[in-house]
Amino acid sequence: QLSLHGKTYVVMGVANKRSIAWGIARALHAAGARLIFTYAGERFENEVKKLVATLEDDTALVLPCDVTKDEEIEACFAQIKEQVGVIHGIAHCIAFANKEHLEGEYMNVDREGFLLAHNISAYSLTAVAKAAKELMTEGGSIVTLTYLGGERVVQNYNVMGVAKASLEASVKYLANDLGKYGIRVNAISAGPIRTLSAKGVGDFNSILKEIEERAPLRRTTTQEEVGDTALFLFSDLSRGVTGEIIHVDSGYHILA
Ligand code: 0WD
């Protein structure tokens, strides 16, 4: 078993126990890492605190960080600096688009919906990476979550696909900027998993069924599979890997 004892990671985007961020948190916790959780708004505070309590780790911190607000990102990382000092990684598991823009034709998105999706789902990685760099004085690893809909057309994914393309390009540019500080930046392109966010995507059930029938491994992706790959990306085992998009999707992306 891989050990991350003595390392501290910030996990952003736990909404409930189905969140991919929670799968990553459990993998990091099992490896002995110290965890800091951030949540989007008061709506999530209680749920996140309840989940974190189940880890029975009294060093875990839970802080608010709505990524649409620069001052909240600043305040959040200032608090982390004060209370913890050095961090070794960030799990960025955050995305949002209006439900009405996740069905039908992509081109029906309006300017506001386009900017909202890009603001929360893509720009936030850059904003957070910049804030986190100051605390990653021993080097670090930043991991974000993307989806196949950013590489090719997946029905209904629409503006979120366009935002994921921006996120994936950001991973590469950030990897280039931060490599000289010993900070690596990678994305996991996860297969579809039933979460709160996934509920917003039109006809999500048929996407899952397609994976079970056609993906090389003939099964859908689990939180645990994503968590274990994140663990690899946070550990020294991946020290030569940066700017990479790793598919954890039962191999579905290789199909035509
Ligand atoms: O099939 C899936 N579930 C896949 C998800 C396949 C491939 C990738 N992903 C990605 C998502 O696009 C996202 O980037 O994984 C990431 C995590 O998503 P999730 O675990 O599927 O969904 P969820 O449990 O809903 O967590 C996403 C969270 C938010 O929850 P809501 O339900 O409000 O969307 O993103 C957070 C929030 O906790 N979030 C924000 N955090 C900070 N500031 C904000 C915000 N403004 N808005 C949303």
Image: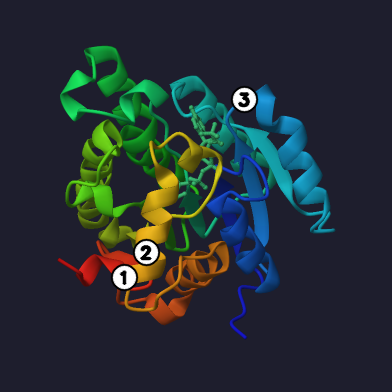
Residue at the farthest bottom position: 1
Q: Is residue 158 left or right of residue 200?
A: left
Q: CA distance from mark 3 to mark 2?
A: 33 Å
> Residue placed at 20% from the left, 29% from the top?
106
Secondary structure found at label 3? loop
Q: CA distance from mark 1 to mark 2?
A: 5 Å
Circle 3 is placed at which residue position?
41
> Residue placed at 42% from the left, 39% from the top?
128
Residue 52 is situated, as x and y percent measured from the top left of the image, at 76, 49
Circle 3: residue type = Gly
Q: Is residue 42 left or right of residue 89?
A: right
Circle 2 is placed at which residue position?
211
Instruction: Tell me if the residue at label 1 has its CB under 8 Å from ligand 1.
Output: no
Select label 3 or label 2 by which is in front.
Answer: 2
Circle 1 is placed at which residue position?
214
> Residue placed at 43% from the left, 81% from the top?
237
Mark 3 and mark 1 residues within 8 Å of each other at the beta carbon: no
Q: Is residue 66 left or right of residue 188?
A: right
Colour scheme of this structure image? Answer: rainbow
Say which label, 3 or 1, has the lower sequence index. 3
Q: Is residue 100 left or right of residue 45?
A: left
Select label 3 or label 1 by which is in front.
Answer: 1
Instruction: Tell me if the residue at label 3 has its CB under 8 Å from ligand 1.
Output: yes
Mark 1 and mark 2 residues within 8 Å of each other at the beta carbon: yes
Residue 222 is situated, as x and y percent measured from the top left of the image, at 53, 65
Secondary structure found at label 1? helix
Circle 2: residue type = Ile
